Structure formats: structure tokens, C-alpha cells
Image (spheres, rainbow, N blue to C red):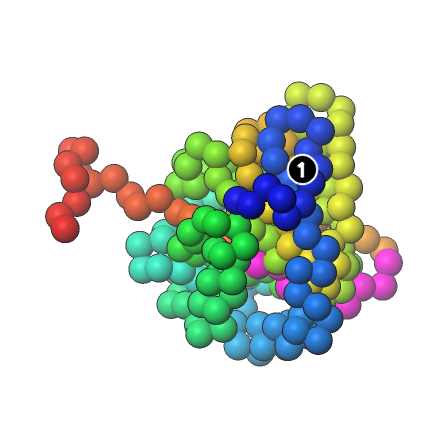
Amino acid sequence: MNQAIADNLAPFDGELYWLRGFYPTASADDHFERLLTELTWQSEQIHLFGRWVTVPRLMAWYGDADAHYRYSGVDHAPLPWTAHLQALRGELETACEHPFNSVLANLYRDGRDSMGLHADDEPELGRNPLIASLSFGDSRLLRFRHKRGRETLDIDLAHGDLLIMAGSLQHHWRHELPKTRLAKQARINLTFRRIAAPPSPLGQSAPN
């Protein structure tokens, strides 16, 4: 990534870059409306503490055909890229100088929708994943908590902002988007990732 585009907000143990207004308001408005109507939003259940619970947000998973992703006990097979998501991917690959083959889209309908404390440290993402997170719609608080210390970091992500998580951040920090009693309108979050191809049987290389 071009290190000159932002300062590292992580005080230690990782890299965190916040590019406010990466997309200006008019462009962000257009992206929000298109994503809201074009993506195949669905409810999701995850396995948590021995039982299945409904996640308080809507989601959609898009990517290359082999970009399967497993988290919280659920396997996700990607939907084919839309032309709009492909265009966004290209712009972020240029900005981050990093390739992506998938994107997780989340729709937070109001302040009651949320995301629990977690780290994006699944094996499919590799050792030190670079994840580019776009925000469209109403602002929401994203809170980081260090896994071993008491340090926290709050970021109020706004319409058109880009947040880049990189280096060893996922090994040392977890993050959450907590519920709020504030009156909030819808927010769409896109997290672009690179999922590693599954290993071939018996460790053999896949055919060309």
C-alpha cells in the first residue's frame, strides 16, 4: 500500500489507515443507492456458544468462483461479481496496491443492527491480511479493542470513508460495531478481501 496516503492510527501491533471522504458525497450517494437496490441481501445465521443465532444485519458475499469463506461455523459460496462491485474493486486495488478476489457486504438497517467483537483472522485470509473497508450511508462507530491489553480505539466511519486494516492488526486487535440508541439511518459496509485458494488433495499443486 502507498504509505503516504494516510497515517497509521494503530498505536502498536498492526496497521490501520482511515481515508475520510475517499468518495465525495455525490459519488458516495450514487454508490449507496446502487448497492442498496442491486445486491442480493439476505439474513444470516451463525453458530455461537453452541446454538444458532440470527445476525442483526443483512449480508451478501460476492467474489471469484473459488473465493469460498468460512466463519462462525458457516460456509459462504460467493455470488458472481456485479459490474458495480467490479468497478469498486478496481479502484481499491489501485489505491491499496493490493489484489482482492472477494467482498463481504453488510447492511445495517438502523441503530439496532450491529456486529459483535471479532477479528478477521480466519486461515483463508492468510497471515497478515489487508482488508479494505468502505462505508456508505449513515455514520457508525467502529471500536477496536486490543486482545491482551485495555487499549481501545474508536473510529466514527462516515459516508464515503475508506478504512484499511493491514499488517498484524487482526492478530492483536478485535473490532465491533455496537448497537446505538441514536436515531440512525441505513449504512452499507463493503470489506474487500483476498481469500486464498483451497489446498489441493495430498498437498499436490493444482493443474494449470
Residue 33 located within the stretch drawn in magenta:
no
Q: Is residue 88 visible?
A: yes
Q: Quadrant of residue 32?
A: bottom right
Tell me which amino acid carries mark 1. Asn
Relative side of 53 to 80, left or right:
right
Near-viewer residue (16 or 123): 16
Q: Is residue 80 above or below residue 193?
A: below
Which x, y percent locates residue 170? Answer: 56, 34
Relative side of 200 to 15, left or right:
left
Mark 1 packing: few (<14 Cα in 10 Å), some, or many (20+)?
some
Which x, y percent locates residue 36? Answer: 60, 74
Q: Residue at x 42, y 51 (%)?
A: 99
Q: Residue at x 40, y 55 (%)?
A: 101
- Which residue is farthest front? 4
Q: Which residue is mark 1?
A: 8
Q: Residue at x 62, y 44 (%)?
A: 4
